[in-house]
Image (spheres, helix red, strand yellow):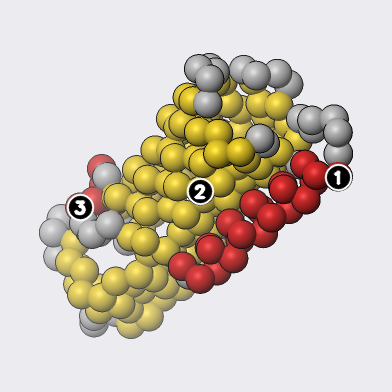
């Protein structure tokens, strides 16, 4: 996972530098890649307390000016753990695995202070989810569905070179998916690169 993320970041950075050298006019299109660390909250935290480090985001969009952008963003998240116990139902899960692939339309509003560009983003769309669990006394069960997804984001872009920013962001993510008996929602800490094409 970490090697794959580094490869994606290297491709984004290298491509942006090549485009900047080949084009005299600055493009309003951008792409970004982020590594994501997730921290369950709410109902999900009742059964899954540990942070998860298996996630990344990819985003492409258009900057209308220095303050507003709209784009399409997608991610990969995987939560897996053994020996979970749901206190409310006394269910013991021997093996638990949930794969999430959200695809969201997202808008950002940002301010520019020299090289620093703080922003607020909101996204909505859907997510493909595939969950499997091995419940003691009940056996293995699997479910696959496409469901509603929502994300709120607060972040900062810091200009490294012309057209390339270091990106750090905190996100709240909510998915209308039941994990055992609990809705899936969490905060995530993200770091990556944003580059103009």
Q: Residues within 10 Å of mark 3 (few under 14, many from 20)?
A: some
SS for dot 3: helix
The circle on residue 192 is: 2
Residue depicted at 65% across the width and 19% down the height: 66
Mark found first going from the N terminus, 2 or 3: 3
Q: Nearer the viewer, residue 182 or 5?
A: 5
104 left or right of 44 in image: right
For label 1, the SS is helix
Dividing the image into 4 quarters, which one contains the C terminus? top right
Q: Nearer the viewer, residue 10 or 141?
A: 10
Comes first in the chain, label 3 or label 1: 1
Disc number for residue 22: 1
Please report whichever mark, 1 or 2, sits nearer to the chain's N-terminal start: 1
Q: Residue under circle 3? A: 46
Q: CA distance from mark 1 to mark 2?
A: 24 Å
Residue 137 visible from this viewpoint: yes
Question: In which quarter of the view is residue 168 placed?
Answer: top left
Q: Residue at x 13, y 59 (%)?
A: 87
Q: Is residue 78 left or right of residue 108?
A: left
Looking at the rendered structure, the secondary structure element under dot 2 is strand
Kindly identify the residue that appears in the image at 85 percent across and 30 percent down.
25
In which quadrant of the rendered view does residue 26 lie?
top right
Numbered badge on residue 141: none
Q: Is residue 116 left or right of residue 96?
A: right
Q: Quadrant of residue 60?
A: top right
Viewer-side label of 3, 1: 1
- Depth-wise, is mark 2 or mark 3 nearer the camera? 2
Q: Nearer the viewer, mark 1 or mark 2?
A: 1
Q: Position of residue 181 (x, y in %)?
A: 30, 56
């Amino acid at each position: 996972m970490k090697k794959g993320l580094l490869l994606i970041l290297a491709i984004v950075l290298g491509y942006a530098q090549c485009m900047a050298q080949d084009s005299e006019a600055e493009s309003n299109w951008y792409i970004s890649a982020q590594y994501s660390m997730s921290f369950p909250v709410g109902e999900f935290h009742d059964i899954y307390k540990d942070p998860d480090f298996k996630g990344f985001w990819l985003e492409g969009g258009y900057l209308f000016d220095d303050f507003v952008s709209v784009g399409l963003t997608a991610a990969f998240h995987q939560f897996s753990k053994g020996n979970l116990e749901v206190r409310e139902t006394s269910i013991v899960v021997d093996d638990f695995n949930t794969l999430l692939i959200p695809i969201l339309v997202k808008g950002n509003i940002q301010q520019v202070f020299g090289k620093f560009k703080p922003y607020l983003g909101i996204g909505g769309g859907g997510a493909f989810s595939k969950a499997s669990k091995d419940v003691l006394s009940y056996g293995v069960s699997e479910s696959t569905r496409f469901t509603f997804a929502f994300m709120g984001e607060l972040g900062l872009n810091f200009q490294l070179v012309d057209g390339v920013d270091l990106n750090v962001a905190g996100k709240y993510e909510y998915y209308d998916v039941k994990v055992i008996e609990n809705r899936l929602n969490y905060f995530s800490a993200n770091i990556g690169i944003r580059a103009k094409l």
